[in-house]
Image (tube, grey):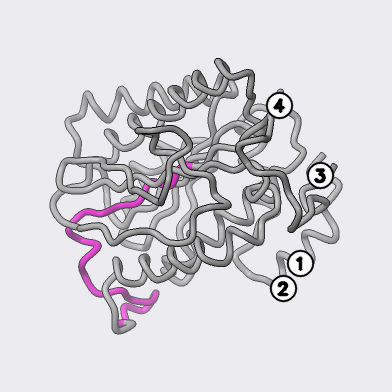
Amino acid sequence: MEFGDFPAVDMDPPEASITRNLVVLLLDASGSMAEADTDEAGNKRGTSKIETLRAALNRFLAIDVHNEPKLQANGELAILTFGNGVVPALTLGNPVLPGSPFHFIRNVTSTPDFPVGGNTPMGAAIGKALDIIDARKQSLAESGITHEFRPNVFLLTDGRPNDAREVLDDSIKRLHAEEARNGVLLWALGTQDAYAPWLERIADKGNYLPLPGNSLAQFLRFVSKSMRRQGGRRGEEDAATIYHDVTRNVSFDEAVDALLDDEGGSARS
């Protein structure tokens, strides 16, 4: 069954599904996110970067993500922010289990405001994302539930990691090991202020993407489109193959996306 074949209404409750799709958003909440949001030419847009991101995130959770039938059917979402040396999980309503950072996407419609400030513990954030995914996989397995595609992590930043070097190195090593065993996918997206050399080391298989137009809203557009593109993929495909296919066939331009969807839909199987 193709992604788009799932009905948008009359679905069973997501907790009744025997498969799940896990999605984690890692959002930079360091002090630089309080600075003015600008376009590629440096012209101010009239809001801070965090204000722009919050508005786009609330639209995504209220409208856009609910137009993705697969995620409506069995998707679980966790949102982690990283800044000021900490990596908290946002409360998005009732979790899938008490104390879990994951929430059924169908029940999520908004996100609480979250503070920004301090440094950029990106390595710790990646490590925590891997931790919560591993814990949720174990919990699902104990209940006889499998994850349909491999879990997806989407990282957004406007800067560079400044964890202790051993923390960052360990998180990158863990990430690449999980990718090698087909355990997770991570997409890194950065503004024009993001430090590409480090992000390309983290996302070293073509899965680092600069945001076009320096647009934070495009991050969430990519989340939706990339998950749609992955519908029906074979589980044995290696991470590099999936990264290449998605980045080649998902455009940030609506018209181009429609063309690619028409011409390349068969590649999803």
Residue contact at pointers 1 and 2, CB within 8 angstroms = yes
**Where 193 falls versus 269 (above or below)?**
below
Q: Secondary structure at mark 3?
A: helix
Which of the two discs, 2 and 4, labels the residue nearer the N terminus?
Answer: 4
Q: Secondary structure at mark 1?
A: helix
> Who's the residue at 43% across and 61% down the image?
110
What whole-number distance in Å separates the C-alpha atoms at marks 1 and 4?
A: 26 Å
Q: Is residue 26 left or right of residue 220?
A: left
Q: Nearer the viewer, residue 230 or 5?
A: 5
In the rendered image, which residue does mark 3 sit on? 267
What whole-number distance in Å separates the C-alpha atoms at marks 3 and 2?
A: 19 Å
Name the disc covering residue 20, or none.
Answer: none
Which of the two discs, 3 and 2, labels the residue nearer the N terminus?
Answer: 2
Q: Is residue 171 left or right of residue 250?
A: left
Quarter of the image holding residue 182? top right
**Where 267 falls versus 171 (above or below)?**
below
Q: Position of residue 64 (x, y in %)?
A: 58, 64
Q: Position of residue 36 (x, y in %)?
A: 24, 74
Q: Residues within 10 Å of mark 4 (few under 14, many from 20)?
A: few
Q: Position of residue 107 (x, y in %)?
A: 53, 52
Q: Nearer the viewer, residue 173 or 112?
A: 112
In the rendered image, which residue does mark 2 sit on? 255
The residue type indicated by label 3 comes to Ala
In the rendered image, which residue does mark 1 sit on? 258
